[in-house]
Amino acid sequence: MIVLGLGALLFVFPFYYMFIGSLQAEPDTTVTSVLPDPGNLTLGNYAEINEKVNLGTSLLNSGIFTGGVIACTVVFGVLAGYALARLRFRGRGAVFGIVLLVQVVPFQLLLIPLYVLIVRGYGLADSHLGVILPFAINTTAVFVFRQFFLQLPNELFDAAHVDGAGELRVMWSVALPLVRPALLTVVLLTFIGPWNEFLWPFLITKQADMQPLAVSLANYISNVAGRAANPYGALLAGACVLAAPVIGLFIAFQRHFVSTDIGTGVKG
């Protein structure tokens, strides 16, 4: 327990330092800044970063981007995962092999063709749809859902088919309630990716009112931070705002990330 406690403190310390740094009126890089002077604490850095990058608009853009990616990932991931796990069709193994192959292709290799396709081909620059489309299908989510659907007892599906249920009805009423841990895990993992994504939104958005928070903070570092009274404090304030939803989401749902006894739904 002592070792685990020390590991937890080491893990939490960067977040603590980030939060304390965001509250300092004057920058303090000494060791004593770990226990700051109460007289040097202020919320002015949050007002400063909000004035320069408009935290409300940036957070809204990040929320739209992340929410759209999560919705597409869950819908397409569930449909594709269920089809690869439960439906019998020619070429199923080849399709699954392609899904695995896509996971080893770095996203950076696709940036140029995606940019040409979405910006020049579809004309979706500076739009929420243009930011969301490259992340609409997540092969990792497809793999996770497929593996969970494969673990479900066949008797449950057979009973539903005997009662006359179609595949969509079986998936909605039988399969989805039993893969809740996988659903929550996919939502959390998917949330972290687009919420912190910088490179693609930076390329696709040029208007300040369309940029998510990660891009707005990067622009602040490049263009404004040098003229700020406490640039590091304002930057850490923006980083706290960016990290807060991820931390809150994990704290709220971490107790659900356990496997349930899915076999209890089968009698005899």
Image (tube, grey):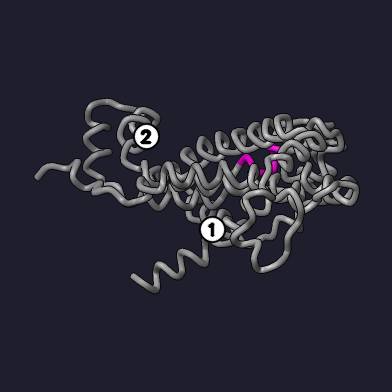
Q: From the viewer's perspective, is residue 261 above or below residue 175? A: below
Neighbour tally class for label 2: few under 14, some 14-19, many 20 plus, Cα within 10 Å = many
- Kindly report the distance in space between the C-alpha atoms of the residues bearing marks 2 and 1: 23 Å
Quarter of the image with the N terminus is: bottom left
Q: Look at the image and tell me whether residue 247 can be seen.
A: yes
As drawn, the residue found furthest toward the left would be: 268
In-image side of 143 versus 34 (left or right): left
Camera-side residue of 93 and 116: 116
| Nearer the camera: disc 2 or disc 1 | 2
Quarter of the image with the C terminus is: top left
Q: From the viewer's perspective, is residue 222 above or below residue 75? A: below
Camera-side residue of 235 and 177: 235
The image shows residue 146 at horizontal and vertical percentages of 43, 49
Residue 135 belongs to the span the image colors magenta? yes
Magenta-colored span: 130-136
Q: From the viewer's perspective, is residue 161 above or below residue 95? A: above
Residue 86 belongs to the span the image colors magenta? no
Which amino acid, by three-letter code, is at mark 1? Gly
The residue indicated by pointer 2 is 171
As drawn, the residue found furthest toward the bottom would be: 3
Which residue: 66% across, 49% down? 39
In terms of image quadrants, where is residue 115? top right
In-image side of 97 versus 46 (left or right): left
The residue indicated by pointer 1 is 97
Neighbour tally class for label 1: few under 14, some 14-19, many 20 plus, Cα within 10 Å = few
Which amino acid, by three-letter code, is at mark 2? Met
